[in-house]
Image: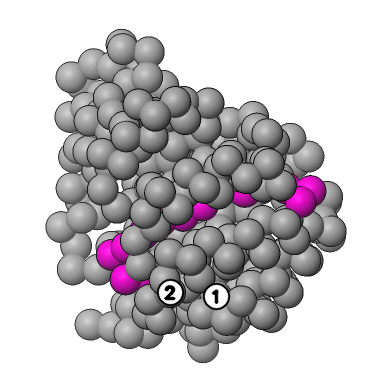
Amino acid sequence: MKKLMNDFHVAVPTAFNSDESVNVDLTLKHIENLYQKGVKSVLVCGSTGEQHSLSCAEKIAILQAIEATHTIPKDLEIIFGVASIRLTEALKLAQAINSTTKIAAALLGFSPYILPSQQEAAAYVTKLALTLNQKAVILYNNPKRTGFDLANETLIKLLQDKNLNNIIGIKEAGDPNKVKQLIDLGFYNHSYYVGGEPDLKNKVALGFNCLSSILGNIYPTLVMNYFANIKNGSVTKVQENEVAKHLQELLTHPSMLPALKAQIATLEQSEISYCRSPLGLV
């Protein structure tokens, strides 16, 4: 199993220009800023609701920029998002990721809207995981976003397939009790990612052992320490209250992603605040 070095990563938003074209340089600059603040792993093109607004060509342009740049440190562990309504496009991106040297893992999401069967979803994962044979693969189950919910029975078959030993775990944004069920069945050596900070303490108690952080874009040190202390049983009420306060500031905004980007823009004095409409419209 191709284990990753870090149990915490920041899911970074993609930067756009005012005309909604991708701003690759500003995306990389935000990643560099996070590294300077102590972040050792990031997720690119895989979360914050933007993955499916990006074309395959745009994702490959970001991937190529990461591969070509000399400003991103070699010890930064980068996870890259892979998902598409069409398997052919996802395979094209997967092939490009598999040939890079700077990407450690792929976050493999399911196709939105089309509602594949469990068998079709398993075949989709199998083809992509085999293509990504040089990389670790994390599955991403997010029924609220996609309309599809990966059943534990399907996941177990995938985890038991010896040809797919690069699947190291799952980012489970559906029923958190599914992770406890997997652990109770003996699947305790895998990585179980929480998607964002809400209800983090309870999810760790269920067996989640990794965090894909959103709030870490703004408060990386706070969230890294908070997560580590939850896991080792030393979290304080002061930490809980501080994280809850900042999280509430994002979640009470009518649209979370524009609020997140606006705060990043203020902190970094950049123009990362642009979103692709209708997000950000007022």
In space, the residues marked 1 and 2 are separated at their CA atoms by: 12 Å
Coloration of the structure image: one colour
Between residue 266 and residue 193, name the one nearer to us.
Answer: 193
The numbered mark, 1 or 2, whose residue comes first in the sequence reads 1
Quadrant placement of the N terminus = top right
Give the mark toward the camera: 1 or 2: 2
Q: Is residue 115 above or below residue 137?
A: below
Viewer can see residue 246: no
Q: Is residue 94 magenta?
A: no
Where residue 91 appears, as percent x and y from the top left, is 69, 71
> In the visual, does 20 lie left or right of 40?
left
Where residue 47 appears, as percent x and y from the top left, is 46, 60
> In the visual, does 176 lie left or right of 58?
left
The magenta stretch spans which residues? 133-147
Between residue 154 and residue 107, name the one nearer to us.
Answer: 154
Q: Is residue 139 magenta?
A: yes
Quadrant placement of the C terminus = bottom left
Residue denoted by label 2: 116
Q: Is residue 234 above or below residue 113?
A: above
- Rate crowding at label 1 as few (under 14), some (14 to 19) or many (20 or more) other CA atoms within 10 Å: many
Where residue 23 appears, as percent x and y from the top left, is 61, 73
- Residue type highlighted by circle 1: Ser
- Residue type highlighted by circle 2: Pro
In the image, which disc is placed on residue 84? Answer: 1
At 18% across and 19% down in the image, what residue appears?
237
At 44% across and 26% down in the image, what residue appears?
186
> In the visual, does 108 lie left or right of 233?
right
Write down the quadrant of residue 114 in the picture: bottom left
- Rate crowding at label 2 as few (under 14), some (14 to 19) or many (20 or more) other CA atoms within 10 Å: some
In the image, which disc is placed on residue 133? Answer: none
Between residue 141 and residue 239, name the one nearer to us.
Answer: 141
